[in-house]
Amino acid sequence: MGTGYKGTNKMITGIVFGVLTFWLFAQAMVNIVPAVQKDLGISLGMLNVAISLTALFSGIFIVAAGGVADKVGRKKITYLGLILSVIGSLCLVLANGSALLIIGRVIQGLSAACIMPSTIALMKEYFEGAERQRALSYWSIGSWGGSGVCSFAGGAIATYMGWKWIFIFSIIFALLAMWLIKDTPESKGEESGEFKFDFGGLAIFIVTMVALNLVITRGKDFGWLSPLTLGLAAVSIIGFFVFIRVEKKKEHALIDFALFKNRPYTGSTISNFLLNAVAGTLVIANTYVQVGRGFTEFQAGMLSLGYLVAVLAMIRVGEKILQRTGAKTPMVWGAILTTIGVAVMGLTFLPDLIYTVVVFSGYAIFGIGLGMYATPSTDTAVSSAPSNKVGEASGLYKMASSLGGSFGVAISATVYGAIQTVGSLEAAAAAGIITNVIFAVLSLLSIMAFIPGKKAPRKTPEPTQSPAT
């Protein structure tokens, strides 16, 4: 932007607080399912829809928000996201039934769509080289570590203060973030002609994603072979192919598929989608230990303490390994450890004490894996993007996170519910967790296929793109 501004620790702290407010309302909901259900008197099916809505709406709008941020200003869109976070959290604080809960979760999804790509773009704009990797490590602590922080904190707050206090804290974090980044200059991408928003592409994308989400989350309720479910499945499949066909012909497309010509960017985005799908483990494990083993919300949160500590400890380690060996080594080992950590949590046939120890250890190994993966993956995606499309590229990368989390949770919960109707709770939990092992293995395969094997100097993107900073 030519401002000469260099990013500060105050700016990093504000951005981390902004990212944490997302996790407070996203991850904390996983821990408090029984409490919210009892307090609001709504069905488990409706509550699962409410949980997945935030990630779904975040995933649907995050690319659009990232693209808009490149054009109108990344700081402006970050602020818009923080304001929406306050409004969405306030809806949940005031909720006394399903209406405000659903509305609040949708607004929170839109909030996350604004915050995530805009803050990554600000990090790239105002930090360079090793300093950018350090800044992205702290962003990852807020993003990846935030899931552990909020899983633990959410359980403690729900048990001792009431679940609505989680969202009061979310409001406080959002307001603090706004204050801390107020001195950061505005940042935009280089102008490249008149800005036209792709409303048509967004409409097709929304219809496709909502139809697919309904098939996964409500297929059992509708009947898997009912005309409604089959119709929704057809809409999602046709919509997917129509979207790709239409977008490839547009000059101002919602998604620039040319970004995927870069193999490292493709690998980091696909593996990010699949590793975030492993978030379904958290829902299954938390629900199972509360329903099947009699844990309180706080005790369930304590089980994930090892995950929290491991993620926070390993994110900077992943950054250092990245600087020494390149991205592939920490990303591969991150996926392998995540697979192992999730797999041992599926040993639900074990007796109480042994299973408790195994789950705690599984969470810790899971956290080590994700922590090691986080910064190398994010840095690979960001550094591979042209400077005038950092917001859009970051939006696609984070869309992979949001949709991965949404579909991972939905698919895991569907498997868990389907097995529970015909078998034991233990078998249902094991099946739900094995589903997540498959996601983790597929993530490992995508890293091995697309991410370069050794560290190489960053190359300037092709002349058709603006040079990356």
Image: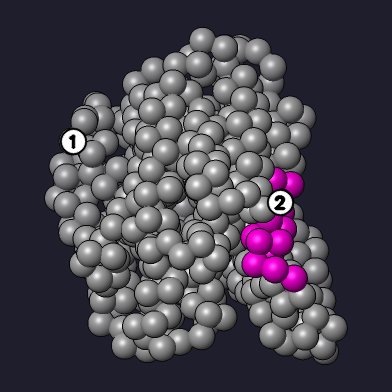
The overriding secondary structure of the stretch rendered in magenta is helix
> Is disc 2 placed on a helix, strand or loop?
helix
> Camera-side residue: 295 or 82?
295
In the image, which residues are magenta?
Answer: 423-438
Task: Give the left or right position of residue 466, taking residue 171 as reference.
Answer: right
Residue drawn at (29%, 66%), measured in percent from left and top? 158
237 shown above or below 279: below
**Which callout, 1 or 2, points to the residue nearer the camera?**
2
Quarter that holds the N terminus: top left
> What SS does tag 1 mark?
helix
Q: Position of residue 441 (x, y in %)?
A: 73, 39
Mark 1 or 2 closer to N-term? Answer: 1
**Crowdedness of circle 2 by 10 Å Cα count: few (<14), some, many (20+)?**
many
**Quarter location, residue 85:** bottom left
Q: What residue is at 25 percent from the left and 71 percent from the top?
A: 162
Question: Is 370 on the left or on the right of 169, as rendered?
Answer: right
Q: Which residue is mark 1?
A: 10
Residue at x 26%, y 61% (from the top left corner): 157
User: In the image, which disc is placed on residue 434?
Assistant: 2
What amino acid is found at the position of numbered circle 1 in the picture?
Lys
Q: Is residue 436 magenta?
A: yes
